[in-house]
Image (cartoon, grey):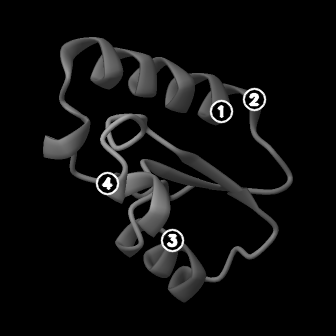
C-alpha cells in the first residue's frame, strides 16, 4: 500500500483487501494502512459487488484521496 500510494500513477486506485484474517483488529489495521475496503473470507458476493461498485464510483469521481473507509458489520 505504501508503494502504491507514493506513486502518482497508482495513488488514485482504490485497493480492496480480501483476507481470511477477520478479527476486528486485522480489519482496522487493513483500513488504517489505506485499503479502500477490507473484505473477509468466506466472500459474501453482495458485499464484494458493492465494494467494487463503490470503488468504481470513487475512481470515476476522483474521490479516492478523500474517501473514508467503511467497516462492514456482516
**Cβ–Cβ below 8 Å for labels 2 and 4?**
no
**How far across and down, in percent of the image, does residue 19 sit?**
76, 63
Visible in this render: residue 16? yes
Task: Find the residue positioned furthest to the right.
Answer: 42
Residue picked out by circle 3: 30
Q: Residue at x 54, y 73 (%)?
A: 27
As helix, strand or loop, the secondary structure at mark 4 comes to loop
**Cβ–Cβ below 8 Å for labels 3 and 2?**
no
Residue picked out by circle 2: 45
Say whether disc 2 or disc 4 marks the residue closer to the N-terminus.
2
Up/down of 31 relative to 44, above or below: below
Mark 3 vs mark 2, CA separation in Å? 20 Å
Say whether disc 1 or disc 4 marks the residue closer to the N-terminus.
1
Mark 1 vs mark 4, CA separation in Å? 15 Å
Q: Which mark is residue 12?
A: none
In depth, the one of 1 and 24 nearer the eye is: 1
Q: Residue at x 13, y 43 (%)?
A: 66
In depth, the one of 23 and 36 nearer the eye is: 36
Q: Nearer the viewer, mark 1 or mark 3?
A: 3
Q: Which mark is residue 48?
A: 1
Q: Residues within 10 Å of mark 4 (few under 14, many from 20)?
A: some
Q: Nearer the viewer, mark 3 or mark 2?
A: 3
**How far across and down, in percent of the image, does residue 54 sit?**
40, 25
Residue picked out by circle 4: 69
Up/down of 14 relative to 68, above or below: above
Visible in this render: residue 1? no
Say whether disc 3 or disc 2 marks the residue closer to the N-terminus.
3
Q: Nearer the viewer, mark 2 or mark 4?
A: 4
Amino acid at each position: 500500500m505504501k508503494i502504491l500510494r507514493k506513486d502518482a500513477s497508482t495513488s488514485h486506485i482504490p485497493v480492496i483487501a480480501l483476507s481470511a484474517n477477520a478479527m476486528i483488529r486485522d480489519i482496522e489495521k487493513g483500513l488504517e494502512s489505506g485499503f479502500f475496503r477490507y473484505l473477509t473470507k468466506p466472500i459474501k458476493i453482495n458485499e464484494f459487488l458493492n465494494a467494487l461498485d463503490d470503488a468504481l464510483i470513487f475512481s470515476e469521481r476522483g474521490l479516492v484521496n478523500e474517501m473514508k473507509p467503511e467497516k462492514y458489520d456482516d
